[in-house]
Image: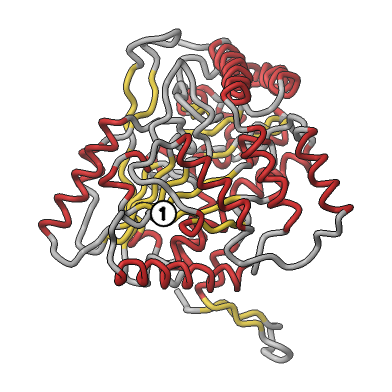
Amino acid sequence: MADCVQFGNAMGSGPQIVIPRQARVFASSAIHSITELALRHGAVNLGQGTPDDEHPQRLRDELAASAQADRSRYTAIQGMPALRQALADNFNRELNPALPYQPDDIMVTQGATEAFFIAINSTVGPDDEVVTTDPYYGLYTGSLQMAFGGDDKIERQLKPFPLKLEPLTEGDYAGQPHFVFDMEAFANTLTEKTKAVVLFNPHNPTGAVLNASQLKRMGQILDDWELDHPGQHIMVIADETYRHILFDGRPHVSVAAEPSLQKRLIYINTLAKTFNTTGYRIGSLALPPTPPGAGRDVQDAKAEWMRNLKGLKNVTSMCSPEPIQAMAVVALNQMATPDYYQSLHERYGARRRKMLDHLSRSPFAGHYAVPDGGYFVMVDIGPTLDRLRPEVKTQYQINDADSFVRNFLIPQIKVAAIPGNGLFRDQQQGGRYIRLSFCQNDDTIEAAFRNLEALSTYLTPAA
C-alpha cells in the first residue's frame, strides 16, 4: 500500500491533493455513518449512544447566565481552576482513589475523545504496542492510528485480548450470559513492546464491569511484568464514562482505587452520559497524583508531563469554552448527589429491563448478553442470519453483521444498530454481533421493536 493517496484527473494535469497515511485515519466512524443512514431512511436509531432525555434545566440556566455575562473569551489551556477543583473533589469523593487528586493533576478537554487523543499521543510512539479488549470502542482507533503513524499499523500494534462469556450466577437474569474480563488472556497479550493498556470500565460495548479482585490481579500482572523486564514501564489509560450506570446493585470500583494501577493511570472522565450533555463536549483527563514526600525531580517531571499535554491541547482545541466549563462546575458541585445517581440507576435499569424483555420475545431471543453496566446490549445475530431466507440474503447481499445492518435492517426494517465488524478484531465474532443502545426513552425503544416485528416475515421457521 502506498504511503499516500493522490487525487487528480485522468490525464495527470491540474492540482494534485496528496493525503499522507497518518491523515487517512479520520474517515467517518461506523457510528457516524450508521447515524447518517438511519436519518436517510427514517429508521429508529438504537445505534448511537446519545440519550434523548432533556438536558437538566439547572444546567441550561447556567449556560444562559454565562452567555448573558459575555463569557466568550479564551480560557486557560489546562481548564478553569474552579472546574479542575470541582473535578478533583468529585474524583476524591466518588472514586476512592489510592492517592487523592489535586487540581494540577487534571486537564479539561473537549469530551473524552479529545482526552484520549491527548493521552495516547503523549504516551505511545510509532513502534509501540497498545493492549486493549476485544471488542473495543471503535472511535478511539483513529487516535491510535495517528500515534502509530499510519492506518496500516493497527493490525500489528493494537493487541486486543478477548472478553469471555459466562453465565450470571445471581439476580433476575441468573443463568443468562454476560461478558467478563479475562485476566489470564490479558497477561498473555503483553509483550516487550507494550507501552499502554486501554480500558473501559464499565466496558463499551459489552457492559462488562471490572471488580476489585480483577483490578488487583491486573495491577499485579503489570508489576510482575515490569520486574521481569527492567526499563519497561506500561501506562494504563482508563475511560470510566459509564461509571454511574450500573445494575443489580453492582458497585463501581474505579481503576484509580487500585494503587498498583493508579500510579500508572491516565484517568479519562466525561460528564456527557451522566448529565445528558453529549453535544457540549466536556471531559477531562487526570495524571497520577504525586506521592506524598516526592522529591523535586518527581515534581519537575510531572510538571513537564503536563506541559506536554497542554502543548497537544493547544493544537487540537486550544481551550474549552468558558460557559461549558461553568456549567460543568454547577453539575459537579450542585447536581452530583446520591439522589441524582439513584435516579440514573432507576431510569436506565427500567430501560434495560424493557430492552431485555423485548429481546426475549424477538427473533434474537436467547442470543444476547446481559450488560452489567453502561447502556448497550450485544446481540449475537448469527442464528438470525442463518434463518434468513436464501432469496432475502441474495436480494440484500447479506453475509455478515455489517451488510445485515446497512443493506437490510436500516432501509427495510427501519431500525439502526452498530455492526460488530467495527468493534471486534476477531472478524468472525464481529461479523455476527450488533450493538443496541437503550439510552433512548421508552417511546423510542417501543417504536424500534414494533419495527423489528417485521423481521420474522423474512425468516425461515425456527427449528
Q: Is residue 141 left or right of residue 447?
A: left
Name the image quarter holding residue 19. bottom right
Q: Is residue 161 left or right of residue 144?
A: left
Query: In x, y percent, where is residue 417?
Result: 61, 34
Query: In x, y percent, where is residue 190?
Result: 23, 53
Asked whether 443 or 18 is in front, the reply is 443
| Residue lying at the far right of the rendered structure | 68
Asked whether 132 or 282 is in front, the reply is 282
Query: In x, y percent, where is residue 379?
Result: 50, 27
Name the image quarter holding residue 275. top right
Q: Residue at the spot x=30%, y=31% of the render?
A: 212
User: Which quadrant of the figure contains the C terminus?
Assistant: top left
Query: In x, y percent, where is residue 287?
Result: 42, 56
- State the colouring used for the structure image: secondary structure
Q: Residue at the spot x=64%, y=50% of the render?
A: 282
User: Which quadrant of the figure contains the N terminus?
Assistant: bottom left
Q: Is residue 294 visible?
A: yes
Q: Residue at the spot x=53%, y=73% of the render?
A: 311
Q: Residue at the spot x=75%, y=33% of the render?
A: 56
Name the image quarter holding residue 16. bottom right
Give the secondary structure at mark 1: strand
| Residue lying at the far bottom of the rendered structure | 13
Asked whether 431 or 142 is in front, the reply is 142
| Residue lying at the far top of the rendered structure | 172
Query: The residue under label 1 is which amino acid type?
Result: Ile
Local packing at callout 1 (Cα closer than 10 Å; few below 14, some 14-19, many 20+) is many
Asked whether 45 or 251 is in front, the reply is 251
From the image, tell me which residue sits under label 1. Answer: 266
